[in-house]
Image (cartoon, grey):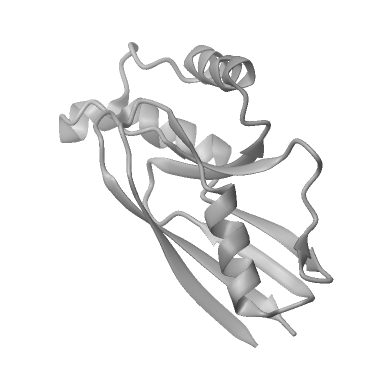
Amino acid sequence: MIITETISLNTKGFSDIIDINSQVLSIVKRSLIANGLVTIFCPGSTGSITTIEYESGVLQDLKDALERIAPSDIPYEHNERWGDGNGFSHVRAALMKPSLTVPLVNGKLTLGTWQQVVFIDFDNRGRHRDIIVQIIGD
């Protein structure tokens, strides 16, 4: 069986980290699928899905690390071509990846105790985002 649902979000941009764990768990519960795979995917090239402990200190640590890895205030060829100033957003999203797949065992996501599924919007402005959650299994 395959179930596909969407989580709709409005974001602030600039590495806005949004905990979507409860929405994903709700979709899993409604699906009635016990064993399989849950894929969470962000269409677009300036957002990412990952897991993290959703705690203010580690959230800030991640934002700070990404700023060191792909600084927002340096020249990017993308900005030269398109003039939209979000070259850093595309680089960060490419590094972090647009999707996450989590095994589903006996009706439960196999996340660790402190792991939450999050969406990160790297764009340089707020946006509306639709996150795709697809469950494959039985």
Q: Is residue 137 left or right of residue 74?
A: right
Q: Residue at x 25, y 35 (%)?
A: 126
Q: How many marks?
A: 0
Front residue (pair 53, 121): 53
- Viewer-nearest residue: 114 or 4: 114
Location of residue 104 in the rendering, given as x and y in whole percent from the top left corner: 77, 66
Nearest the eye: 30 or 12: 30
124 and 78: which is toward the camera? 124
- Residue at 37% across, 31% down: 89
Residue situated furthest bottom in the rendering: 1
In the rendered view, would you say 107 is above or below 16?
below
Residue 125, percent across and down?
24, 31
- The quarter of the image holding the N terminus is bottom right
Left or right for 24, reference 123 = right
Is residue 29 positioned above or below 60 on the image? below
Judge from the rendering whether residue 110 lies leftward or rightward of residue 89; answer left or right: right
The image quadrant where one finds the C terminus is bottom right
> Where's residue 81, x and y in %?
19, 33
Task: Write down the quadrant of residue 31 in the picture.
Answer: bottom right
- Residue furthest toward the left? 83
Q: Pick out the residue farthest to the right.
A: 106
Q: Is residue 79 left or right of residue 37?
A: left
Decide: is 93 above or below 79: below
Q: Residue at x 28, y 32 (%)?
A: 78
Tell me: residue 109, above or below residue 9. below
Quarter-of-image position of residue 109: bottom right
Residue 58, given in percent of the width and then of the height, sits at 63, 19
Residue in the image at 51% along x and 58% along y: 41
Q: Quadrant of residue 131?
A: bottom left
